[in-house]
Amino acid sequence: MTSFSKTYPNIAYWTESCGWIEIGYDEFSQSFMRVLDEGGTLWESEHKYASFDEALDELEAALQKIIDEFGG
């Protein structure tokens, strides 16, 4: 069994050092997940996924791009 931070290093890094992630549905957004920092929303996911693992994989990839672009 692997730890979450080994499987999803960008998610772990983001939540420990840069900002936060919202997971779930609410009345304000059509997305399932959102990446935020003090400046606001940086990324929103699709509305629905076949599995939670698929959603986390997409979030991990999106955070890699954000960290590379903004320097985390």
Image (tube, grey):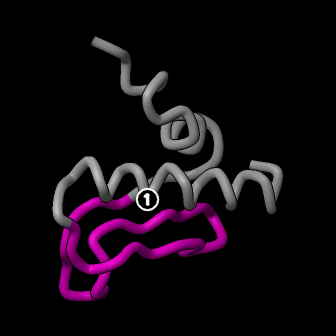
Could you say where residue 1 lies in the image, as x and y percent from the top left? 27, 12
| Label total for image | 1
Q: Observer-nearest residue: 63 or 37?
A: 63
Residue type at tag 1? Glu
Could you say where residue 31 lies in the image, as x and y percent from the top left? 31, 79
For mark 1, give the secondary structure.
Answer: helix
Q: Does the magenta stretch include residue 38?
A: yes
* Residue at image point 19% right, 73% down: 25
Which stretch is magenta? Answer: 22-49
Image vertical order of residue 43 relative to residue 16, above or below = below
* Residue at image point 80% right, 61% down: 69
Could you say where residue 59 lies in the image, as x and y percent from the top left? 45, 56
Label 1 environment density (alpha carbons within 10 Å; few <14, some 14–19, many ≥20): some
Q: Observer-nearest residue: 22 or 4?
A: 4
Residue corresponding to mark 1: 58
Q: In this view, does 56 lie to the left or right of 42?
A: left
Image vertical order of residue 27 relative to residue 15, above or below = below
* Residue at image point 21% right, 75% down: 48
* Residue at image point 80% right, 59% down: 70
